Image (cartoon, rainbow, N blue to C red):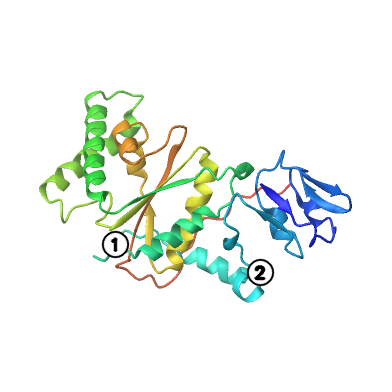
Amino acid sequence: MFKVDREICIACEQCIKDCPVNDIYLKEGKAHIKNEACIKCGHCIAICPVKAVSTDDYDMNEVIEYNKEDFEISPDRLLNFIKFRRSVRRFKDKEVEKEKIEKIIEAGRFTQTGTNSQDVSFTVLTKDLPKIKELTYEILNKKGQYILDNMNDNIKHLERYANLWTRMYVEHKKNPQNYDRLFLNAPLAIIVSAKSPLDGGLASSNMELMVDALGLGTYFNGFFQVAAEDNKEILDLLNIKDGKKLISCLVIGYPNVKYKRTVPRKEADVTWM
């Protein structure tokens, strides 16, 4: 429940004006939260000039006072940081510290979600990653073989992927330590799941930025998603809860490559109206 300390409240009405669901009003000259339509977004906590608003739904010790030095980053510096990031596919044989994993998850946890649903979940794969890896190779091989055995005009566009998946499986079985085109022998993968694809996608993007800020590298493993999206065995192993979808798989590790510059891109496709 969100509440206002009437002894502290100065009735500035900032929380009333900023509440997205109009759940706050003045009662006897002080702000009062009805807690009827409240979505627990915390705008009232963030905006109050005298710290009169609190909640027992979340840990108030997480609240950090704003100061420019710790919170602001210049637009040009942020844009350069985004432009410089690369999808990393070469990793060192080095574990990722738990403290860094927790920061990556924090970046996802504090990402905005629709109606403040906070519906994003995270599955961290370290010790069970080899098991998931082997299962993924097997599933993709079966998918690829099925496509090749049942080729027709409707699935012709999948032929090159089918050939790739079956070839990857064979090569991996021959030399599992040195041939890993799926997880690239990275020590860590984080699976993001959510009811809303948008919420999960936004969280994944913020997590990717934190990965780079921590001196790590990552890439989004799309082939794993192909293998897992309709496979109950994998979804059960990952503990993907009912009603949630697997949104992304971030393969993470210390990069064994150092890039020197940004790269060019296509012109932005923009419609000004």
Residue at image mark 1? 90
SS at badge 2: loop
Q: Is residue 151 above or below residue 224?
A: above
Q: Residue at x 39, y 65 (%)?
A: 99
Q: Is residue 175 above or below residue 138?
A: below
Q: Is residue 270 visible?
A: yes
**105 to the left or right of 43:** left
Q: Earlier in the sequence, mark 2 or mark 1?
A: 2
Residue 6 position in % (x across, y down): 80, 57
Three-letter amino acid code of the residue under disc 2: Tyr
Query: In which image quadrant can residue 121 be found?
Result: top left
Query: In which image quadrant can residue 23 be found?
Result: top right
Q: Nearer the viewer, mark 2 or mark 1?
A: 2
Residue at image mark 2? 66
Q: Is residue 47 above or below residue 112?
A: below
Q: Is residue 232 above or below residue 123?
A: above
Q: Is residue 164 visible?
A: no
Q: What is the C-alpha distance between the residues marked 2 and 1? A: 38 Å
Count of numbered badges drawn on the protein: 2
The answer to which of 31 and 235 lies nearer the viewer is 31
The answer to which of 64 and 187 lies nearer the viewer is 64
Q: Residues within 10 Å of mark 1 (few under 14, many from 20)?
A: some
Three-letter amino acid code of the residue under disc 1: Arg
**227 to the left or right of 211:** left
